[in-house]
Amino acid sequence: MGIIEKIKEIEEEMARTQKNKATEYHLGLLKAKLARYRAQLLEPTTKSSGGGTGFDVQKSGDARVALIGFPSVGKSTLLNKCTHTTSESAAYEFTTLTAIPGVIEHQGARIQLLDLPGIVEGASQGKGRGRQVVATAKTADLILIMLDATKSEEQRRLLEIELDAVGIRLNKKKPDVVFKRKTTGGITINTTVKLTKTDEKTIRTILAGYKLHNCDVMIREDITTDEFIDVLIGTRKYMPCLYVYNKIDAISLERMDKLAREDHTVVISCEMGLNLDYLIEHIWEELGLVKVYTKKRGAHPDLTDPICLRKGATIEDVCNGIHRSLATHFRYALVWGKSSKFCPHAQKVGLNHLVADEDVVSIFTK
Ligand SMILES: Nc1nc2c(ncn2[C@@H]2O[C@H](COP(=O)(O)OP(=O)(O)OP(=O)(O)O)[C@@H](O)[C@H]2O)c(=O)[nH]1
Ligand SMILES: [K+]
Ligand SMILES: [Mg+2]
């Protein structure tokens, strides 16, 4: 029996099984099994099969954003509007058949936007080019889930299921659980909070299902059973996501207003060019990009050519952004802006200092 059939069988059994206290442990076991098979499904079987690997597009710029959505929601139209690249767009489904990269230039940053083929329900299980699309999504720094505002709400949940099936967790933090394998000593489970969504017995059942008989588990958050399985599997990817409802030119104001109020959501019309600048600003924010201006001694800061960095960047990253050898000759830096302790005045800092968006930095060398 193939993996897909096995998955089907377990899913059917889960659907048949009534959810109650007596079946909770059995369902937990089935869930663990299901997650394991899904993980296998994603592993490329042979090098040449291509299953599970993404499209071969070189990363470029400061960050990568992937466009995921059902066919004909307007993904290619968005790429055409926001970048200098052209991707064919048309009124029929599956117009786009491969990954097409474009570049959004914003505030000195170069953000790679990847147009991808539309996916269909079941994409994660190998329907269409779906697996290649979702595997490519994993390589991005931000996922844009594009939805057709004129279609039913159901589409959003269906896409979430496909991404979930390949281990992508959207807009979620990694569960605060420490898991350590041991060679002897049995299982120790410690919790620092009261568990209301799962319990120790379920966790032990799942550990047994994975043949883990010696390990330490420290749970520091009120997790669900699914979240615990995520921790065990360990290859989950926690990614930021923006939901983009396109074609608002074709819906009522009331519906637009309702959609726009949802979390992590932006409403746009590619065709009418509505709200596209706002979308790009949101992309910038979600990516947590930081731009820093440099200033030579006695001169004004250079506001035309900022250095673009990721959230968490330090003065060392600024040095590397200017010149490869600058950090080795570094003596100290002066920084003006939000990261300066003495803002609006400058602070003298070392290589490890964290910079903030719109800081001005002067580097002094030996
Ligand atoms: N009304 C309206 N139609 C739009 C809008 N954006 C795109 N369309 C239309 O939607 C259709 C599909 O657009 P595409 O850009 O090809 O969609 P896609 O998501 O790339 O489609 P696939 O590549 O086939 O998955 C085209 O006929 C577009 O003209 C919009 O904002 N409003
Ligand atoms: K299309
Ligand atoms: Mg397209």
Image: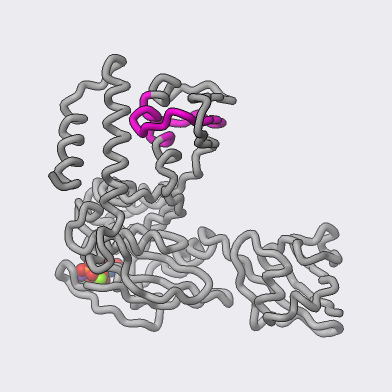
Number of marks in picture: 0
Q: Tell me if residue 223 is in the magenta stretch.
A: yes
Q: Is residue 271 visible?
A: no
The answer to which image quadrant residue 102 occupies is bottom left
Q: Nearer the viewer, residue 218 or 293?
A: 218
Whereabouts is ligand 3, in terms of quadrant? Answer: bottom left
- In the image, is 329 to the left or to the right of 238? right
Q: Residue at x 49, y 23 (%)?
A: 195
Above or below residue 96? Residue 241 is: above
- In the image, is 230 to the left or to the right of 49? right
Q: Residue at x 50, y 36 (%)?
A: 181
- In the image, is 231 to the left or to the right of 149? right
Position of residue 361 measured from the top left corner of the image (x, y, whole percent) = 76, 73
- In the image, is 211 to the left or to the right of 314? left
Position of residue 337 measured from the top left corner of the image (x, y, whole percent) = 76, 65
Position of residue 265 measured from the top left corner of the image (x, y, whole percent) = 41, 53
Residue range of the region highlighted in magenta in the rendering: 205-228
Q: Nearer the viewer, residue 109 or 328?
A: 328
The answer to which image quadrant residue 128 occupies is bottom left
Q: Residue at x 86, y 66 (%)?
A: 348
Q: Is residue 31 visible?
A: yes
Q: Residue at x 22, y 65 (%)?
A: 49
Q: Quadrant of the C terminus?
A: bottom right
